[in-house]
Image (cartoon, grey):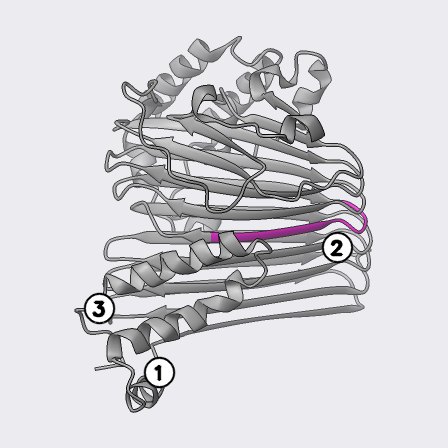
């Protein structure tokens, strides 16, 4: 089966040669590594909680252009610009550059290397079959470069829509570049119908000295979808990266954040909430690498799993030998609503320096029956009481979202998710 899969993907890669000028050699390298490595299995340590059997059992074709234009939802908040991708293709007529083009350089991925072919080496190939596939089959994406000293006040929204794409895939690559002292807020959204598609997206970012990138992700893929997404971020001196991920949709979802702190006083905060309904699997993997002294990182993750739902968090912090005076914290808490629900945690510290302050913690439990009783004894109905407790439980992981409109939209999604569970019993609260 492995040979059949790779033959199919080699054919797809061949059809894409020339679509991203300057990237054909990179595509060939990634494809060669993909053939050698294959897709992750349950024996692959970093993928032990993610069920990728679908990738090992069928070839996902390249998603076709949408036959009809789907409805595009309104922005989560006031935006500086929004870029819409349908079935992995940029939809210019549905996008709105606003005034962003006056402050920043915006170009399609296909044009990124035309004037400077050497920059193709900056594309991250990745180390596993999923990221290598993204590189081998990359076709579209957006490149946003914000010049030094420019601060974009409102968020920039990127919407990924999938429609009528059963057994098809979209492999997108977005590149964010911030000059010294620049600031950008990026909102990614993922939406799809009930077809069994694969959405595979990578964002790579370079944050130079004193620059700030705030990154919010709202994953609402269709119920049968496979969602894989990764961020690769390099942060220089006094730079800042804040990421918050809310995972709600898809049958199987996995988000990875790979952050390297390369300059003194650089900082990274990677937070997230995952809500797994019956039959869903949400997996998060983070790896924050402290390379130099005096950098800080913080991670807050909260997950909730309903009956036969599954969540997982694998968080790794590496402190290199020269990264003295590092401060790194990591917190994971999970709620399970049923005896059949599953929550997995694997926090990990890899420390090679002596002068560090690092901590991690992981807990899994049920809703507090005493808290429910306390609220109901004061006239609050049980459904509202449980909703209030879950909102409070997840609030820490959303706190660092700077834009109030985006934060409110995500909080509302959590409330709506809880509202669909108002008629069923929840473990620990009966």
How packed mark 3 is, by other alpha carbons closer than 10 Å (few <14, some 14-19, many 20 or more), is some
Question: What percent of the width, then of the height, locates residue 105?
Answer: 68, 25
Residue for badge 1: 368
Query: Closer to the N terminus: mark 1 or mark 2?
Result: 2
Report which residue position mark 3 lands on.
422
Secondary element under disc 2, as helix, strand or loop, is: loop
Q: Is residue 278 above or below residue 93?
A: below
Q: Between disc 3 and disc 2, whose residue precedes?
A: 2
State the CA–CA distance, disc 3 to disc 2. 48 Å
Does 369 lie within the magenta span?
no
Residue 128 in sight here: no
Residue occupying image coordinates x 74% and y 60% = 352
What is the secondary structure assignment of the residue under circle 1?
Answer: loop
The stretch of residues the image draws in magenta is 236-245
> In this orientation, does residue 289 appear?
yes
The residue identified by callout 2 is 320
Residue 65 sits in which quadrant? Answer: top left
Task: Say which mark, if any, is on residue 89.
Answer: none
For the residues labelled 1 and 3, say whether their Cβ atoms are less than 8 Å apart. Answer: no
- Say which of marks 1 and 2 sits in front: 1
Residue 398 on image: x %, y %: 51, 61
Measured along the vertical axis of the image, is residue 379 above or below residue 218? below
Which of the 4 quarters of the picture holds residue 223?
A: top left
Residue 245 is left or right of residue 221, and the answer is: right
Mark 2 and mark 3 in contact (Cβ < 8 Å)? no
Between 400 and 49, the one lying in front of the other is 400
């Amino acid at each position: 089966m492995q040979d059949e899969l790779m033959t199919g993907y080699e054919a797809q890669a061949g059809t894409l040669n020339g679509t991203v000028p300057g990237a054909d050699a990179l595509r060939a390298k990634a494809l060669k590594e993909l053939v050698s490595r294959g897709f992750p299995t349950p024996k692959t340590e970093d993928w032990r909680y993610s069920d990728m059997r679908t990738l090992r059992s069928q070839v996902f074709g390249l998603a076709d252009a949408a036959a009809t234009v789907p409805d595009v939802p309104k922005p989560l908040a006031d935006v500086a610009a929004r870029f819409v991708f349908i079935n992995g293709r940029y939809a210019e007529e549905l996008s709105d550059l606003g005034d962003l083009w006056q402050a920043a350089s915006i170009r399609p991925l296909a044009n990124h290397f035309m004037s400077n072919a050497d920059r193709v080496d900056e594309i991250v190939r990745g180390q596993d079959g999923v990221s290598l596939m993204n590189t081998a089959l990359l076709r579209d994406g957006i490149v946003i470069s914000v010049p030094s000293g420019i601060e974009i006040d409102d968020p920039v929204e990127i919407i990924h829509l999938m429609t009528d794409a059963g057994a098809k895939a979209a492999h997108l690559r977005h590149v964010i570049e911030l000059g010294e002292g620049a600031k950008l807020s990026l909102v990614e959204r993922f939406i799809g119908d009930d077809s069994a598609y694969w959405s595979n997206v990578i964002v790579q970012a370079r944050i130079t000295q004193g620059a700030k990138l705030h990154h919010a992700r709202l994953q609402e893929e269709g119920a049968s979808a496979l969602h894989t997404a990764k961020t690769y971020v390099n942060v220089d001196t006094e730079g800042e990266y804040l990421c918050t991920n809310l995972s709600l949709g898809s049958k199987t979802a996995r988000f990875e954040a790979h952050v390297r702190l390369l300059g003194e006083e650089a900082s990274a905060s990677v937070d997230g909430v995952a809500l797994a309904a019956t039959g869903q699997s949400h997996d998060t993997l983070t790896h924050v690498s402290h390379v130099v002294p005096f950098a800080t990182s913080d991670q807050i993750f909260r997950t909730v799993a309903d009956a036969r739902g599954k969540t997982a968090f694998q968080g790794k912090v590496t402190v290199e030998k020269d990264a003295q005076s590092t401060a790194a914290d990591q917190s994971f808490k999970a709620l399970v609503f049923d005896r059949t629900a599953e929550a997995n945690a694997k926090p990990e510290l890899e420390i090679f320096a002596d002068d560090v302050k690092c901590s991690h913690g992981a807990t899994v439990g049920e809703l507090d029956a005493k808290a429910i009783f306390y609220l109901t004894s004061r006239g609050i109905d049980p459904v509202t009481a449980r909703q209030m407790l879950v909102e409070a439980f997840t609030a820490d992981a959303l706190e660092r979202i700077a834009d109030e409109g985006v934060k409110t939209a995500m909080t509302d999604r959590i409330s709506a998710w809880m509202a669909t569970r108002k008629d069923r019993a929840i473990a620990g609260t009966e």
